[in-house]
Image: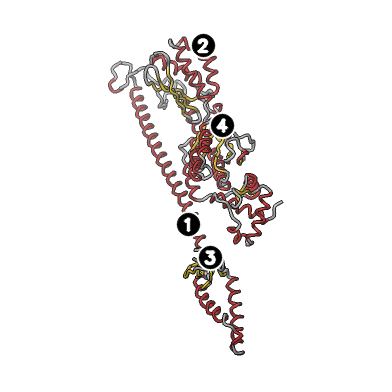
Amino acid sequence: MLSNRQIELLKLIVEDYIKTARPVSSKSLCEILKCSSATIRNEMSELENLGLLEKTHTSSGRIPSEKGYRFYVDNIMEPKKLTGDDMLKLQTIFKNNSLMISDTIIKSMEIISDLTHYTSIVLGSTASYNKVTKVEIVPLDEYRFIGIVITDQGHVEHRNIVLNEKVSLEEIKKTVELINKLIVGTPINEVSSKLEFEIKPIIPQYVKQHEVLYNAFYNAFSDFTNSPNINLHKPSNILMEPEFDNIDKVREIVSKFDDQNMIKNITQDDSEDGSIKIYIGSENEFDDDVTVIKTKYKANGEEGTIALIGPKRMEYDRVVTLLNYIKENIDENKMWLDKEDMMKEEIKDENIKSENCECGNTNNSDSCDCIDDTCTCDNECDCKCDDVDKCECGDCCESNDLKKNKKEKKDKHKEKFKELEKKIEELENKNKELSDQTLRSQAELINYRKRKDDELSRMLKYAGEDMIKELLQILDNFERAINMDDDNLEDEVSKFLSGFKMIYCKFVSILEKNGVKAIDGGNKPFDPTYHQAVMTEAREGVEPGMVLEVLQKGYLLKDKVIRPAMVKVSE
C-alpha cells in the first residue's frame, strides 16, 4: 500500500518523464513536495524496490517502469480536458455530413495522430457488413480492365484485372450486367459462393468467353473478401521519439508496421464492453517498447477498431480523452445516419409510386393529373406524336390540349423541383458555414477564457512584486545596521540595535508569510538562474564555479526570482 506522498511522487515522476523523456532527480521535486532531497531519495528507493521505478544507470535519476505506468493508468491518471483547438479540428470532421461514417472515423483518427504524434490505426468493418450495390468496369485495353465494386456502406474498392486471352468489350459488359442482376444486395464475403453456385451454371448461355471472364471476376471478389480493411496513418511518427534511436530497433518496428496480419491481430478488440483498453509494453502483441491504446466502435451496421501506438511514456490522459470523444461523436452521428436511411427509403417509395399511376383516379377517369410518362390511365388518346402542335396522324382528339397542358405542368414541376433542390443546397451550405463559425467562436472563447484565467492567476500570484522590491532595500539597510558589533557600543546605542534586530526579524517573518524567501547561495555551485556574479577570486582548495561569498542577498517570490543574489565566484 502506497502512502499519499509516494502516490504523489510517482505521479510527478511519470508525468515529468512523459513530457521530457529525461530521468527525474530528487532535487527537482524538493520544492513541489516540500521535502528534503534525502527524504525524496528514500521514497524513490522504496518505489524502486516495489518495481514501480527504475534507473537507466547507477547515478541517474528515476524513470517509471512498466509496472509503474500500469499503476499510474489504473489508480492515478485522470482524463485530460479537451482543448478548444483539438475540439474544433475534430468537430470540423464530425459536422461534415457529406462524409460516410467510415471516412469520418479515418479522418478523425488522422487528426489525432497529427495532434499526438503517435501512429493511428483503423481496422474497418468486416466484409459481412458490406453488401454489393453495384459492379462497374473501366476498360484499359483488350486484355486489361479495372473492376470497381461499390457497397451499401459507401465503400469503393477497385482491382486491376488482367485476362489471359483477348476478350471483346461487349462480352465483358454482358458479364457485368449478369453479375449486377444476381449479386446486388449480397454481402461481399458471400459473393464468391453466389458466383460459384448461381452465376457459373448460367453464364455460358449469355457469354461466349465465359470461362476466362468468370475466373477473373471470381478471383477479384475473393481478393476483396480476404484483404483486410486497414488504415495506417503516419507509422513514422513513433520513430521520431527519442526511445527509438537504435537503427536495429527502427528496422524491427518498420517491419512490424508492414505486416498487415500483425496489425490486424493487435487491433482486434476482444472486449465485449467496448471500453478503451491500454496495453503497455509486454502486455501487447506488437512490441515490448510501445503502448497500444485501442477501442471498438459500432455505427450504422459497421464495426471495427481504432487504435493509437506510441512509446510507453505516452500521454495516456490525453489519448484516452481523444478516443472517448471520437466514440461519443460516432454515437451522435448514428442519429443523422438513421435520418439518411429514412430519406433513402422515402425516395425509394416515391420511385416505386412513379412506376404506376397514383393520381387517385380510376382508369376510366376524365381528370388524370399524372405527370409521369408511364401513366396507365385510359385518359390517354392514341396519338403518339411528340409534337402535338404539328400532329398530322389524324388520331389526335381533344386530348391534344390535355397533352399540352400535362407537358406544361410537368415542365413546371421539374423547374420547381430544381429550384427547391438549389434552395436546399444553399441552406445546407449556409448551415455548415454557421456551424463552423459557431465552433470556431466557441474554441476562441475557450482559449480567451484560459488566457485571461492564466493572466489573472499570475497577477494574483505576483501582485506585490513591485512593493516587495522596494521593501528589500529597507531590509538591506536593516541588515547592515544589525551586523554592527554591539559589544563595543554604548548601552543606549546597543538598545537601539536590539530594537532594530526585533523589527528586522518581524519584517522577515511577514515577508516569508507572503511567499518571499532568501536564496541560499553560500558554498554552492554557481547557478545563473539564482546568482549574479559580480566578482571572481582564485582560492586554494576550492573548485572553480563555487560561490565564495554572497555580497547581496537574492530573493524568491514564491517560485519566481525577483532579485538574483550578487555573489563572488571562485575561478
Q: Which residue is mark 2?
A: 201
Q: Nearer the viewer, mark 1 or mark 4?
A: 4
Q: Is residue 340 visible?
A: no
Separation of marks 1 and 3 at Cα, in angstroms: 45 Å
Which residue corresponds to mark 1? 448
Question: What type is the residue that disc 2 sits on?
Answer: Pro
| In front of the other: 475 or 419 | 475
Where residue 418 appears, x then y in whole percent? 38, 34
The image quadrant that residue 142 belongs to is top left
Residue type, label 4: Met
Residue to which mark 3 is pinned? 546
Q: Secondary structure at mark 2?
A: loop
Give the amino acid at mark 1: Tyr
Q: What is the x, y in percent for residue 132?
A: 50, 24
* x 58%, y 32%: residue: 265
| Pointer 2 with pointer 4, Cβ within 8 A | no
Q: Secondary structure at mark 1?
A: helix
Q: Is residue 166 above or below residue 271?
A: above
Q: In terms of sequence position, does the residue under pointer 2 or pointer 4 come before the other?
A: 2
Q: Secondary structure at mark 3?
A: loop
Does residue 489 lie above or below 448 as drawn? below
Q: How many numbered discs, if any?
A: 4
Looking at the picture, how far across and down is residue 457, in whole percent? Answer: 53, 63
| Marked residue nearer the N-terminal end (3 or 2) | 2
- Name the residue type under label 3: Met
